[in-house]
């Protein structure tokens, strides 16, 4: 069983959830849980699930150029109480961000990689998706296919790697529209939201 944890704190319309579900559709037995629920039910319940899992996928949006604080908290608690317990467990990451460049997700992936080294887990690689909210919001529209060209490639590559419990280099998606167009659209949306 592959355990996926969505570390977004959004109650609905989580972009991370969207990318995790797409990955789940390419794999066999997976369970997606939310970090909010992990904190509600407690660490022991989470550890029980992790004991049954043969891979862990951390789904996390980029928050202030890093991992959301609540996800850091979970990793710290696991390190404090269970260091060495999950040795050889492969850990993967699916992350997205609001900015155009997926490369800005590198520090988040490094945090998880370093945590794996300290925990004794195996860092299996990450998928970093640029312009995540746009890709998630425009799903099933006429430009969905174009926007998703490289994301789909990344999801397939990660799914293949997870299925074999192997490791891969981090995959940073290319955003399939020109940067200037993305910035213009993002500013228009931002100005609209300010007007309420
Ligand atoms: C508190 C907070 C901090 C964020 N920081 C960044 C950031 O540093 N860089 C960025 O590109 N996007 C940032 N974002 C945007 C999110 O990464 C983006 O909207 C993502 O799709 C959210 O995923 P979710 O819907 O699963 O929560 C931030 C969003 C929030 C709420």
Image (cartoon, helix red, strand yellow):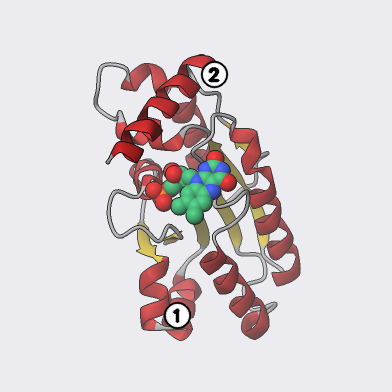
Residue 37: image location, x then y, percent: 35, 72
Q: State the count of labels.
A: 2
Look at the numbered discs 1 and 2 and tell me whether their residues touch, using CB distance below 8 Å.
Answer: no
Label 1 lies in ligand 1 vicinity (Cβ under 8 Å): no
Q: Answer with left or right where residue 88 lies relative to residue 192.
A: right
Q: Answer with left or right where residue 50 lies relative to residue 64.
A: left
Direction front: furthest residue: 195
Give the residue at x 52% y 60%. Answer: 55
Q: Specify the label residue 179 is tagged with.
A: 2
Label 2 lies in ligand 1 vicinity (Cβ under 8 Å): no
Residue 149: image location, x then y, percent: 44, 21
Q: Nearer the viewer, residue 36 or 186?
A: 186
Count residues near mark 2 (Cα–Cα under 10 Å), then give few for <14, some for 14-19, many for 20+: few
Quadrant location of residue 127?
A: top right
Give the residue at x 24% y 27%. Answer: 140
Give the residue at x 54% y 60%. Answer: 68
Q: Nearer the viewer, residue 66 or 37?
A: 66
Earlier in the chain: of badge 1 and badge 2, it is 1
Count residues near mark 1 (Cα–Cα under 10 Å), then give few for <14, some for 14-19, many for 20+: few
Can the viewer see residue 161?
A: no
Residue 83: image location, x then y, percent: 68, 79
Q: Quadrant of the C terminus?
A: top left
Residue holding disc 1? 48
Q: Specify the label residue 121 is tagged with.
A: none
SS at badge 2: helix
140 lies above or below 124: above
Can the viewer see residue 186?
A: yes
């Amino acid at each position: 069983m592959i355990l996926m944890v969505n570390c977004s704190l959004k109650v609905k319309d989580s972009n991370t959830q969207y990318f995790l579900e797409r990955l789940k559709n390419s794999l066999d037995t997976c369970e997606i849980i939310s970090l909010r629920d992990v904190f509600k039910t407690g660490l022991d319940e989470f550890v029980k699930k992790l004991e049954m899992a043969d891979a862990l996928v951390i789904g996390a949006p980029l928050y202030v150029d890093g991992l959301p604080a609540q996800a850091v908290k979970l990793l710290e608690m696991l390190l404090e109480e269970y260091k060495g317990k999950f040795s050889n467990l492969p850990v993967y990451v699916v992350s997205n961000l609001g900015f155009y460049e997926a490369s800005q997700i590198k520090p988040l992936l490094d945090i998880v990689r370093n945590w794996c080294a300290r925990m004794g887990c195996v860092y299996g690689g990450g998928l970093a998706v640029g312009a995540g909210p746009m890709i998630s919001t425009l799903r099933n529209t006429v430009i969905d296919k174009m926007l998703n060209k490289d994301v789909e490639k990344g999801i397939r590559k990660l799914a293949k790697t997870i299925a074999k419990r192997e490791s891969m280099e981090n995959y940073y998606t290319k955003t399939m529209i020109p940067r200037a167009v993305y910035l213009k659209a993002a500013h228009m949306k931002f100005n609209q939201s300010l007007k309420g």
